[in-house]
Image (tube, rainbow, N blue to C red):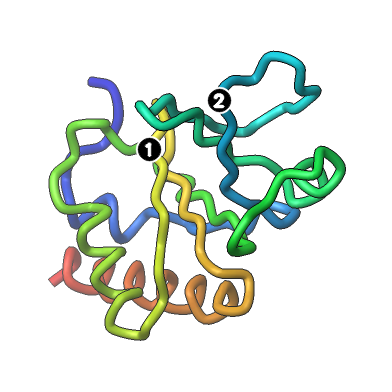
Amino acid sequence: MSGETNLTRLLSSMQPTFREGEYVFCTLPSLSGHDLDPIGFFKEEEGLTLIVSRHQAEAAGLPYSAIFAMITLSVHSSLEAVGFLAAIATRLAIHGISVNPVSAFYHDHLFVPVVQAETAIALLHELAAESGSTSSA
């Protein structure tokens, strides 16, 4: 099995962890001619969306519209897990916090506005604690 699929176990053991730095989403036609080291990218019809450190974007003169903190959920989640990110996004949305999730092979990564990052991580810890108490009942 590659990763956890049980929603209760995922939520109770997500272990949200801040990653150092500030991140931004930028777009370019391609990476050629740019000395960037994105932590993630996605190719769309309109161009290449990059997730880079704020420092890299500013050094390259790339515009961005918001600054994000990155929270990694340390649980090894399956790419086929159902409801995990929905539960997280719902909890954050109730408190007016936007989230841009990125699922990778081992973990999910959440990009939340820097100014709301402390609140977001507190809410995630609260959700994990609630899910842990539910699973032991």
Badge 2 amino acid: Pro
| Location of residue 99 with respect to 97 vertically, above or below | above
Question: Which label sits on residue 103?
Answer: 1
- Give coordinates of residue 72: x percent, y percent: 52, 49
Q: Residue furthest bottom?
A: 95
Q: Please tell me which residue is depicted at 35% across the width and 85% down the height of the picture.
A: 95
**Number of numbered discs on residues:** 2
Q: Residue furthest right?
A: 59
Question: Viewed as shown, does residue 99 lie left or right of 114?
Answer: left
Q: Quadrant of residue 38?
A: top right
Relative to the observer, which residue lies in front, 30 or 88?
30
Task: Provide the secondary structure element on which disc 1 rests.
Answer: strand
Q: Where does label 2 land, which residue? A: 29
Q: Quadrant of the C terminus?
A: bottom left
| Location of residue 74 with respect to 89 vertically, above or below | above
Badge 1 amino acid: Ser
Q: Quadrant of the N terminus?
A: top left
Q: Please tell me which residue is depicted at 55% across the width and 78% down the height of the picture.
A: 116
| Location of residue 104 with respect to 129 vertically, above or below | above
Question: Viewed as shown, does residue 2 lie left or right of 59?
Answer: left
Mark before the other along the chain sequence, 1 or 2: 2
Q: Please tell me which residue is depicted at 24% across the width and 71% down the height of the picture.
A: 90
